[in-house]
Amino acid sequence: MQDALIFLLPLTLLLVHIVSRLRLRHAPTRKAAYARLTAARSALQRMLHTLGLGQPDVYVTDRFATHRLLVHGAAAGGAFSDRPPSIVPSAVLSRRRHYNINSAPYGPLWRAVRRNLTSEILHPSRLRRYGPARRRALGGLVADLDRQRASGGVVLAVESLREAKFGLLAAMCFGGGVDAGLVRAMADTQDDLVQFFLGLRVFATLPAVTGLIYRNRWRKLVELRRQQEQTYLPLIDARRDRASRHGEAPLYVDTLVDLRVSDEHAASAGTRRRRRRQQRRLTDGELVGLCSEFLGAGTEPAAAALQWIMANLVKRSDVQRALRKEIDAAVGADADEVREEVLGRLEYLNAVIMEGLRLHPTVPMVLRQVMAEDHVVLDGRRLPAGTAVHFPLARLARDKTAWADPREFRPERFLAGGEGEGEGVNLVAAAGSAGEIRMMPFGGGRRICPGMASPCSTSATSWPTW
Protein backbone atom coordinates (compact mmCIF):
# COMPACT_ATOMS: atom_id res chain seq x y z
CA MET A 1 0.00 0.00 0.00
CA GLN A 2 2.80 2.40 0.87
CA ASP A 3 4.51 1.69 -2.45
CA ALA A 4 1.27 2.42 -4.27
CA LEU A 5 0.89 5.77 -2.50
CA ILE A 6 4.48 6.71 -3.33
CA PHE A 7 3.75 5.90 -6.97
CA LEU A 8 0.37 7.65 -7.15
CA LEU A 9 1.33 10.88 -5.39
CA PRO A 10 3.68 12.28 -8.05
CA LEU A 11 1.47 10.92 -10.82
CA THR A 12 -1.60 12.65 -9.36
CA LEU A 13 0.23 15.94 -8.97
CA LEU A 14 1.46 15.67 -12.53
CA LEU A 15 -2.03 15.04 -13.89
CA VAL A 16 -3.49 17.95 -11.90
CA HIS A 17 -0.83 20.22 -13.30
CA ILE A 18 -1.48 19.05 -16.88
CA VAL A 19 -5.24 19.47 -16.55
CA SER A 20 -4.89 22.95 -15.04
CA ARG A 21 -2.72 23.99 -17.96
CA LEU A 22 -5.08 22.53 -20.56
CA ARG A 23 -7.95 24.63 -19.20
CA LEU A 24 -6.06 27.79 -20.09
CA ARG A 25 -4.93 26.76 -23.56
CA HIS A 26 -6.35 25.50 -26.80
CA ALA A 27 -6.39 21.75 -27.19
CA PRO A 28 -3.04 20.60 -28.58
CA THR A 29 -2.66 18.59 -31.75
CA ARG A 30 -2.27 14.85 -31.46
CA LYS A 31 1.42 15.11 -32.27
CA ALA A 32 2.00 17.85 -29.69
CA ALA A 33 -0.01 15.97 -27.05
CA TYR A 34 2.02 12.83 -27.68
CA ALA A 35 5.28 14.79 -27.35
CA ARG A 36 4.12 16.33 -24.07
CA LEU A 37 3.05 12.98 -22.64
CA THR A 38 6.36 11.40 -23.67
CA ALA A 39 8.27 14.18 -21.93
CA ALA A 40 6.04 13.83 -18.85
CA ARG A 41 6.66 10.07 -18.76
CA SER A 42 10.44 10.59 -18.89
CA ALA A 43 10.23 13.19 -16.14
CA LEU A 44 8.10 10.86 -14.02
CA GLN A 45 10.62 8.08 -14.49
CA ARG A 46 13.34 10.39 -13.22
CA MET A 47 11.23 11.29 -10.21
CA LEU A 48 10.59 7.63 -9.41
CA HIS A 49 14.31 7.08 -9.64
CA THR A 50 14.94 9.78 -7.07
CA LEU A 51 12.29 8.22 -4.81
CA GLY A 52 14.22 4.98 -4.83
CA LEU A 53 11.89 3.13 -7.20
CA GLY A 54 14.29 3.25 -10.17
CA GLN A 55 17.91 2.35 -10.60
CA PRO A 56 19.93 2.62 -7.36
CA ASP A 57 22.77 5.07 -6.96
CA VAL A 58 26.27 3.64 -7.13
CA TYR A 59 29.18 4.80 -4.97
CA VAL A 60 32.72 4.16 -6.21
CA THR A 61 35.47 4.36 -3.59
CA ASP A 62 38.21 2.23 -5.19
CA ARG A 63 40.96 4.40 -6.69
CA PHE A 64 41.64 2.04 -9.59
CA ALA A 65 37.96 1.74 -10.51
CA THR A 66 37.62 5.52 -10.27
CA HIS A 67 40.46 5.98 -12.75
CA ARG A 68 39.05 3.34 -15.08
CA LEU A 69 35.58 4.88 -15.12
CA LEU A 70 36.43 8.59 -15.26
CA VAL A 71 39.60 8.56 -17.36
CA HIS A 72 38.95 5.55 -19.59
CA GLY A 73 35.19 5.36 -19.32
CA ALA A 74 34.68 6.21 -22.99
CA ALA A 75 36.96 3.44 -24.26
CA ALA A 76 34.10 0.96 -24.69
CA GLY A 77 31.65 3.48 -26.13
CA GLY A 78 29.81 6.58 -25.02
CA ALA A 79 31.42 9.38 -23.03
CA PHE A 80 30.33 8.95 -19.40
CA SER A 81 30.53 12.73 -19.09
CA ASP A 82 26.98 13.71 -18.15
CA ARG A 83 25.73 14.65 -14.73
CA PRO A 84 22.37 14.05 -13.02
CA PRO A 85 19.75 16.81 -13.47
CA SER A 86 21.22 20.03 -12.15
CA ILE A 87 19.72 22.30 -9.50
CA VAL A 88 21.54 25.45 -10.59
CA PRO A 89 19.03 28.33 -10.93
CA SER A 90 19.58 28.81 -14.68
CA ALA A 91 18.65 25.22 -15.45
CA VAL A 92 15.75 25.02 -12.99
CA LEU A 93 14.03 28.26 -13.97
CA SER A 94 14.43 27.70 -17.71
CA ARG A 95 13.19 24.10 -17.65
CA ARG A 96 16.65 22.82 -18.68
CA ARG A 97 17.13 25.27 -21.56
CA HIS A 98 19.71 27.62 -20.00
CA TYR A 99 22.82 25.97 -18.71
CA ASN A 100 26.22 26.91 -17.38
CA ILE A 101 29.43 24.88 -17.64
CA ASN A 102 28.68 22.91 -14.49
CA SER A 103 25.15 21.92 -15.45
CA ALA A 104 25.26 21.61 -19.25
CA PRO A 105 24.97 18.09 -20.65
CA TYR A 106 27.99 16.81 -22.50
CA GLY A 107 27.75 18.11 -26.04
CA PRO A 108 28.40 21.11 -28.34
CA LEU A 109 27.20 23.80 -25.90
CA TRP A 110 29.27 22.44 -23.03
CA ARG A 111 32.37 22.14 -25.19
CA ALA A 112 31.98 25.67 -26.56
CA VAL A 113 31.52 27.48 -23.24
CA ARG A 114 34.20 25.43 -21.50
CA ARG A 115 36.70 26.01 -24.32
CA ASN A 116 35.93 29.71 -24.18
CA LEU A 117 36.71 29.87 -20.45
CA THR A 118 39.88 27.80 -20.81
CA SER A 119 41.41 29.57 -23.79
CA GLU A 120 40.19 33.14 -23.32
CA ILE A 121 40.43 33.56 -19.52
CA LEU A 122 42.34 30.76 -17.77
CA HIS A 123 45.19 30.31 -20.22
CA PRO A 124 48.46 31.39 -18.51
CA SER A 125 49.13 34.05 -21.14
CA ARG A 126 45.72 35.58 -20.40
CA LEU A 127 45.98 35.27 -16.63
CA ARG A 128 49.21 37.25 -16.60
CA ARG A 129 47.33 40.27 -17.94
CA TYR A 130 45.19 40.35 -14.80
CA GLY A 131 48.26 41.03 -12.66
CA PRO A 132 47.27 44.65 -11.82
CA ALA A 133 43.78 43.53 -10.78
CA ARG A 134 45.24 40.84 -8.53
CA ARG A 135 47.61 43.31 -6.91
CA ARG A 136 44.72 45.70 -6.23
CA ALA A 137 42.70 42.87 -4.68
CA LEU A 138 45.67 41.86 -2.52
CA GLY A 139 46.21 45.44 -1.39
CA GLY A 140 42.56 45.76 -0.42
CA LEU A 141 42.69 42.45 1.47
CA VAL A 142 45.75 43.49 3.49
CA ALA A 143 44.23 46.89 4.27
CA ASP A 144 40.97 45.29 5.42
CA LEU A 145 42.79 42.85 7.71
CA ASP A 146 44.86 45.71 9.15
CA ARG A 147 41.70 47.70 9.91
CA GLN A 148 40.15 44.76 11.73
CA ARG A 149 43.31 44.16 13.73
CA ALA A 150 43.63 47.84 14.67
CA SER A 151 40.05 47.90 15.97
CA GLY A 152 40.96 45.33 18.60
CA GLY A 153 38.12 43.00 17.69
CA VAL A 154 37.99 39.57 16.09
CA VAL A 155 39.64 39.44 12.66
CA LEU A 156 37.22 37.73 10.25
CA ALA A 157 39.86 36.64 7.76
CA VAL A 158 37.61 34.37 5.72
CA GLU A 159 35.07 37.12 5.06
CA SER A 160 37.88 39.42 3.96
CA LEU A 161 39.27 36.72 1.67
CA ARG A 162 35.85 36.07 0.18
CA GLU A 163 35.25 39.77 -0.47
CA ALA A 164 38.68 40.23 -2.08
CA LYS A 165 38.28 37.17 -4.28
CA PHE A 166 34.79 38.14 -5.41
CA GLY A 167 35.96 41.67 -6.22
CA LEU A 168 38.83 40.30 -8.31
CA LEU A 169 36.52 37.99 -10.25
CA ALA A 170 33.99 40.80 -10.77
CA ALA A 171 36.81 42.88 -12.31
CA MET A 172 37.79 39.95 -14.54
CA CYS A 173 34.18 39.46 -15.57
CA PHE A 174 32.83 43.01 -15.98
CA GLY A 175 35.88 45.28 -15.71
CA GLY A 176 37.48 47.27 -12.95
CA GLY A 177 35.17 50.26 -13.25
CA VAL A 178 32.11 48.63 -11.64
CA ASP A 179 30.83 50.58 -8.65
CA ALA A 180 31.88 49.04 -5.33
CA GLY A 181 28.31 49.14 -4.05
CA LEU A 182 27.15 47.19 -7.10
CA VAL A 183 29.85 44.59 -6.55
CA ARG A 184 28.70 44.29 -2.93
CA ALA A 185 25.09 43.78 -4.11
CA MET A 186 26.23 41.05 -6.52
CA ALA A 187 28.15 39.36 -3.72
CA ASP A 188 25.15 39.50 -1.37
CA THR A 189 22.86 37.92 -3.96
CA GLN A 190 25.45 35.26 -4.74
CA ASP A 191 25.78 34.50 -1.04
CA ASP A 192 22.00 34.18 -0.72
CA LEU A 193 22.00 31.68 -3.60
CA VAL A 194 24.77 29.66 -1.97
CA GLN A 195 22.86 29.55 1.32
CA PHE A 196 19.68 28.58 -0.54
CA PHE A 197 21.35 26.00 -2.79
CA LEU A 198 20.46 22.87 -0.83
CA GLY A 199 16.82 23.94 -0.82
CA LEU A 200 16.83 23.72 -4.62
CA ARG A 201 17.18 19.94 -4.59
CA VAL A 202 13.42 19.54 -4.70
CA PHE A 203 13.41 21.13 -8.18
CA ALA A 204 15.91 18.68 -9.67
CA THR A 205 13.06 16.72 -11.25
CA LEU A 206 9.64 17.89 -12.37
CA PRO A 207 10.08 21.55 -11.39
CA ALA A 208 6.61 22.31 -12.75
CA VAL A 209 5.13 20.02 -10.09
CA THR A 210 7.51 20.68 -7.22
CA GLY A 211 7.19 24.40 -7.89
CA LEU A 212 3.52 24.09 -6.92
CA ILE A 213 4.32 22.13 -3.77
CA TYR A 214 7.20 24.32 -2.59
CA ARG A 215 5.78 27.66 -3.65
CA ASN A 216 7.69 29.75 -1.15
CA ARG A 217 11.03 28.27 -2.25
CA TRP A 218 10.12 28.81 -5.89
CA ARG A 219 9.19 32.44 -5.27
CA LYS A 220 12.45 33.02 -3.42
CA LEU A 221 14.40 31.47 -6.28
CA VAL A 222 12.59 33.64 -8.83
CA GLU A 223 13.29 36.73 -6.73
CA LEU A 224 16.99 35.96 -6.38
CA ARG A 225 17.21 35.38 -10.11
CA ARG A 226 15.42 38.66 -10.78
CA GLN A 227 17.95 40.47 -8.60
CA GLN A 228 20.78 38.92 -10.57
CA GLU A 229 19.24 39.92 -13.89
CA GLN A 230 18.69 43.49 -12.71
CA THR A 231 22.34 43.68 -11.67
CA TYR A 232 24.08 41.76 -14.45
CA LEU A 233 22.12 42.62 -17.60
CA PRO A 234 22.91 46.38 -17.60
CA LEU A 235 26.61 45.52 -17.26
CA ILE A 236 26.31 42.95 -20.05
CA ASP A 237 24.44 45.37 -22.33
CA ALA A 238 27.08 48.03 -21.73
CA ARG A 239 29.71 45.68 -23.14
CA ARG A 240 27.82 44.60 -26.27
CA ASP A 241 28.83 47.65 -28.33
CA ARG A 242 32.13 48.38 -26.63
CA ALA A 243 35.25 49.25 -28.60
CA SER A 244 37.99 46.92 -27.45
CA ARG A 245 41.33 48.53 -26.74
CA HIS A 246 44.57 46.91 -27.78
CA GLY A 247 46.47 45.37 -24.90
CA GLU A 248 43.68 45.42 -22.33
CA ALA A 249 42.98 42.26 -20.36
CA PRO A 250 40.03 40.32 -21.81
CA LEU A 251 36.81 40.44 -19.84
CA TYR A 252 34.87 37.23 -19.39
CA VAL A 253 31.59 38.88 -20.35
CA ASP A 254 33.14 40.13 -23.61
CA THR A 255 34.14 36.60 -24.58
CA LEU A 256 30.60 35.38 -23.85
CA VAL A 257 28.95 38.17 -25.85
CA ASP A 258 31.19 37.36 -28.83
CA LEU A 259 30.75 33.59 -28.52
CA ARG A 260 28.73 31.61 -31.07
CA VAL A 261 27.41 28.16 -30.16
CA SER A 262 25.66 25.44 -32.10
CA ASP A 263 21.90 25.87 -32.25
CA GLU A 264 20.78 22.52 -30.90
CA HIS A 265 17.14 23.60 -31.01
CA ALA A 266 17.15 24.45 -34.72
CA ALA A 267 14.11 23.69 -36.83
CA SER A 268 13.78 20.10 -37.90
CA ALA A 269 13.83 21.07 -41.57
CA GLY A 270 17.07 20.39 -43.43
CA THR A 271 19.77 17.82 -43.01
CA ARG A 272 21.48 17.03 -39.74
CA ARG A 273 24.77 18.37 -41.13
CA ARG A 274 23.08 21.66 -42.04
CA ARG A 275 21.56 22.00 -38.55
CA ARG A 276 24.97 21.46 -36.97
CA ARG A 277 26.32 24.40 -38.95
CA GLN A 278 23.70 26.79 -37.57
CA GLN A 279 25.14 29.09 -34.93
CA ARG A 280 23.53 31.37 -32.39
CA ARG A 281 24.46 33.85 -29.69
CA LEU A 282 24.04 33.02 -26.03
CA THR A 283 20.70 34.09 -24.57
CA ASP A 284 20.42 36.62 -21.75
CA GLY A 285 19.54 33.79 -19.40
CA GLU A 286 22.66 31.87 -20.36
CA LEU A 287 24.83 34.98 -20.04
CA VAL A 288 23.53 35.69 -16.53
CA GLY A 289 23.98 32.05 -15.54
CA LEU A 290 27.55 31.85 -16.84
CA CYS A 291 28.56 35.11 -15.16
CA SER A 292 27.00 33.96 -11.89
CA GLU A 293 28.85 30.66 -12.16
CA PHE A 294 32.15 32.44 -12.84
CA LEU A 295 31.77 34.59 -9.73
CA GLY A 296 30.40 31.89 -7.45
CA ALA A 297 32.60 28.94 -8.47
CA GLY A 298 35.70 31.09 -8.21
CA THR A 299 34.86 32.52 -4.79
CA GLU A 300 33.27 29.95 -2.49
CA PRO A 301 35.61 26.98 -3.14
CA ALA A 302 38.65 29.26 -2.77
CA ALA A 303 37.38 30.65 0.53
CA ALA A 304 36.59 27.16 1.84
CA ALA A 305 40.00 25.77 0.83
CA LEU A 306 41.88 28.69 2.36
CA GLN A 307 39.83 28.43 5.54
CA TRP A 308 40.83 24.78 5.99
CA ILE A 309 44.47 25.54 5.19
CA MET A 310 44.55 28.36 7.74
CA ALA A 311 42.92 26.15 10.36
CA ASN A 312 45.61 23.52 9.86
CA LEU A 313 48.34 26.15 10.01
CA VAL A 314 46.97 27.35 13.35
CA LYS A 315 47.11 23.79 14.68
CA ARG A 316 50.57 23.11 13.24
CA SER A 317 52.99 25.82 14.30
CA ASP A 318 55.87 23.79 12.85
CA VAL A 319 54.27 24.02 9.40
CA GLN A 320 53.83 27.76 9.90
CA ARG A 321 57.51 28.19 10.70
CA ALA A 322 58.63 26.09 7.73
CA LEU A 323 56.38 28.06 5.40
CA ARG A 324 57.59 31.39 6.78
CA LYS A 325 61.21 30.27 6.40
CA GLU A 326 60.70 29.35 2.74
CA ILE A 327 58.99 32.66 1.93
CA ASP A 328 61.65 34.72 3.72
CA ALA A 329 64.39 32.86 1.86
CA ALA A 330 62.70 33.54 -1.47
CA VAL A 331 61.78 37.24 -1.15
CA GLY A 332 63.31 38.46 2.10
CA ALA A 333 61.76 38.94 5.54
CA ASP A 334 60.89 42.58 4.89
CA ALA A 335 59.17 42.11 1.51
CA ASP A 336 55.67 43.54 1.18
CA GLU A 337 54.49 40.89 -1.27
CA VAL A 338 55.44 37.65 -2.95
CA ARG A 339 55.73 38.25 -6.68
CA GLU A 340 53.81 35.88 -8.92
CA GLU A 341 56.93 34.68 -10.72
CA VAL A 342 58.27 33.50 -7.33
CA LEU A 343 55.18 31.52 -6.33
CA GLY A 344 55.95 28.60 -8.62
CA ARG A 345 59.31 28.09 -6.88
CA LEU A 346 57.82 27.87 -3.39
CA GLU A 347 57.67 24.09 -3.18
CA TYR A 348 56.56 23.93 0.44
CA LEU A 349 53.76 26.43 -0.16
CA ASN A 350 52.48 24.33 -3.04
CA ALA A 351 52.76 21.23 -0.86
CA VAL A 352 50.66 22.91 1.84
CA ILE A 353 48.00 23.80 -0.75
CA MET A 354 47.91 20.28 -2.20
CA GLU A 355 47.72 18.68 1.25
CA GLY A 356 44.90 21.04 2.18
CA LEU A 357 42.98 20.07 -0.95
CA ARG A 358 43.65 16.37 -0.38
CA LEU A 359 42.46 16.37 3.21
CA HIS A 360 39.56 18.81 2.72
CA PRO A 361 38.12 18.72 -0.82
CA THR A 362 36.00 21.78 -1.51
CA VAL A 363 33.17 19.65 -2.94
CA PRO A 364 32.06 16.32 -1.45
CA MET A 365 31.34 14.38 -4.63
CA VAL A 366 32.05 14.05 -8.30
CA LEU A 367 28.83 12.94 -9.99
CA ARG A 368 28.13 11.21 -13.29
CA GLN A 369 24.97 9.79 -14.80
CA VAL A 370 25.00 6.82 -17.13
CA MET A 371 23.38 7.68 -20.44
CA ALA A 372 21.89 5.26 -22.97
CA GLU A 373 24.93 5.56 -25.27
CA ASP A 374 27.42 4.90 -22.46
CA HIS A 375 28.96 1.50 -21.85
CA VAL A 376 29.94 1.65 -18.18
CA VAL A 377 31.02 -1.62 -16.57
CA LEU A 378 31.65 -1.94 -12.83
CA ASP A 379 32.51 -5.24 -11.13
CA GLY A 380 31.72 -7.11 -14.34
CA ARG A 381 28.21 -5.67 -14.63
CA ARG A 382 27.07 -3.00 -17.08
CA LEU A 383 25.36 -0.15 -15.28
CA PRO A 384 21.93 0.64 -16.76
CA ALA A 385 21.09 4.03 -18.20
CA GLY A 386 19.91 6.50 -15.58
CA THR A 387 22.22 5.23 -12.84
CA ALA A 388 23.83 8.05 -10.86
CA VAL A 389 27.46 7.27 -10.03
CA HIS A 390 29.02 9.03 -7.03
CA PHE A 391 32.76 9.41 -6.44
CA PRO A 392 33.29 10.62 -2.81
CA LEU A 393 36.41 12.77 -2.89
CA ALA A 394 37.32 12.74 0.80
CA ARG A 395 37.15 8.96 0.99
CA LEU A 396 39.33 8.54 -2.09
CA ALA A 397 41.92 10.94 -0.70
CA ARG A 398 41.99 9.23 2.72
CA ASP A 399 42.53 5.71 1.45
CA LYS A 400 44.89 3.95 3.88
CA THR A 401 46.26 1.79 1.07
CA ALA A 402 47.33 4.89 -0.87
CA TRP A 403 48.54 7.24 1.88
CA ALA A 404 50.36 6.78 5.17
CA ASP A 405 48.34 8.26 8.03
CA PRO A 406 45.85 9.74 5.55
CA ARG A 407 43.97 11.78 8.17
CA GLU A 408 47.11 13.67 9.21
CA PHE A 409 47.93 17.08 7.73
CA ARG A 410 51.41 16.40 6.41
CA PRO A 411 52.54 18.67 3.53
CA GLU A 412 55.90 16.88 3.37
CA ARG A 413 54.23 14.01 1.54
CA PHE A 414 54.14 16.25 -1.58
CA LEU A 415 57.84 17.16 -1.44
CA ALA A 416 60.68 15.30 -3.16
CA GLY A 417 60.90 11.77 -1.81
CA GLY A 418 57.39 11.88 -0.33
CA GLU A 419 54.56 9.52 -1.22
CA GLY A 420 52.87 12.27 -3.22
CA GLU A 421 56.04 13.41 -5.01
CA GLY A 422 55.25 15.07 -8.32
CA GLU A 423 51.56 15.46 -7.67
CA GLY A 424 52.05 18.91 -6.16
CA VAL A 425 53.85 20.05 -9.30
CA ASN A 426 52.14 18.02 -12.00
CA LEU A 427 48.49 18.38 -11.16
CA VAL A 428 47.50 15.95 -13.91
CA ALA A 429 49.10 13.20 -11.83
CA ALA A 430 46.68 13.96 -9.02
CA ALA A 431 43.87 13.35 -11.48
CA GLY A 432 45.05 9.85 -12.31
CA SER A 433 47.65 9.81 -15.05
CA ALA A 434 49.37 6.83 -13.39
CA GLY A 435 46.43 4.41 -13.67
CA GLU A 436 44.93 5.23 -10.29
CA ILE A 437 43.34 8.22 -8.58
CA ARG A 438 44.65 8.85 -5.08
CA MET A 439 43.07 12.29 -4.91
CA MET A 440 41.15 14.42 -7.39
CA PRO A 441 40.42 17.88 -6.01
CA PHE A 442 39.97 19.01 -9.62
CA GLY A 443 37.70 16.19 -10.74
CA GLY A 444 38.57 13.72 -13.48
CA GLY A 445 37.76 12.72 -17.02
CA ARG A 446 36.40 15.10 -19.63
CA ARG A 447 34.85 17.31 -16.95
CA ILE A 448 38.11 17.83 -15.11
CA CYS A 449 38.59 21.38 -13.82
CA PRO A 450 39.30 23.68 -16.79
CA GLY A 451 41.70 25.78 -14.73
CA MET A 452 43.77 22.86 -13.46
CA ALA A 453 46.70 23.58 -15.79
CA SER A 454 46.86 27.23 -14.71
CA PRO A 455 49.40 28.37 -12.11
CA CYS A 456 48.70 26.86 -8.69
CA SER A 457 48.39 30.31 -7.13
CA THR A 458 45.39 31.08 -9.33
CA SER A 459 43.64 27.81 -9.96
CA ALA A 460 44.46 25.44 -7.11
CA THR A 461 41.97 27.05 -4.77
CA SER A 462 39.73 28.78 -7.30
CA TRP A 463 38.38 26.36 -9.88
CA PRO A 464 37.96 22.87 -8.39
CA THR A 465 34.20 22.32 -9.07
CA TRP A 466 33.98 22.08 -12.83
Image (tube, rainbow, N blue to C red):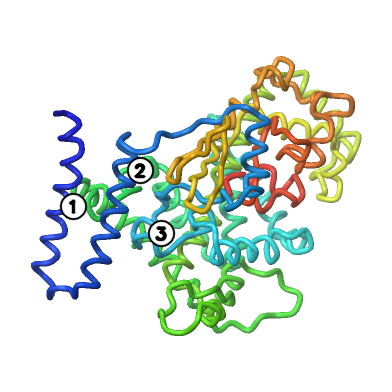
**Amino acid type of the residue tagged 1 in the rendering:** Leu
Please tell me which residue is depicted at 48% across the width and 68% down the height of the picture. 287
Which residue, given by chain and number where applicable, does mark 2 sit on? 201
Does label 2 or label 1 sit earlier along the sequence?
1
**Amino acid type of the residue tagged 2 in the rendering:** Arg
Q: Tell me, yes or no, if residue 71 can be seen here.
A: yes
Please tell me which residue is depicted at 57% across the width and 30% down the height of the picture. 379
Which residue, given by chain and number where applicable, does mark 3 sit on? 90
**Amino acid type of the residue tagged 3 in the rendering:** Ser
Q: Nearer the viewer, residue 259 or 161?
A: 259
Image coordinates for residue 431, horizontal then vertical, percent: 71, 40
Which residue, given by chain and number where applicable, does mark 1 sit on? 14
Image coordinates for residue 329, horizontal then vertical, percent: 91, 34
Residue 97 falls in image quadrant: bottom left
Image coordinates for residue 210, horizontal then vertical, percent: 24, 48
Image coordinates for residue 320, horizontal then vertical, percent: 76, 24
Crowd rating for badge 2 (residues with CA inside 10 Å; few <14, some 14–19, many 20+):
some
Q: Nearer the viewer, residue 218 or 111?
A: 111
Residue 178 falls in image quadrant: bottom right
Q: Up-down: is 323 above or below 71? A: above
Q: Up-down: is 138 above or below 223? A: above
Q: Tell me, yes or no, if residue 155 can be seen here.
A: no
Residue 361 falls left or right of residue 404: left
Asked which secondary structure carries label 3, the reply is helix
In the rendering, which numbered label is found on residue 70? none
* Real-space Cα separation, disc 2 to disc 3, in angstroms: 14 Å
Q: Nearer the viewer, mark 2 or mark 1?
A: 1
* Real-space Cα separation, disc 1 to disc 3, in angstroms: 22 Å
Residues tagged 2 and 1 counted as in contact (Cβ below 8 A): no
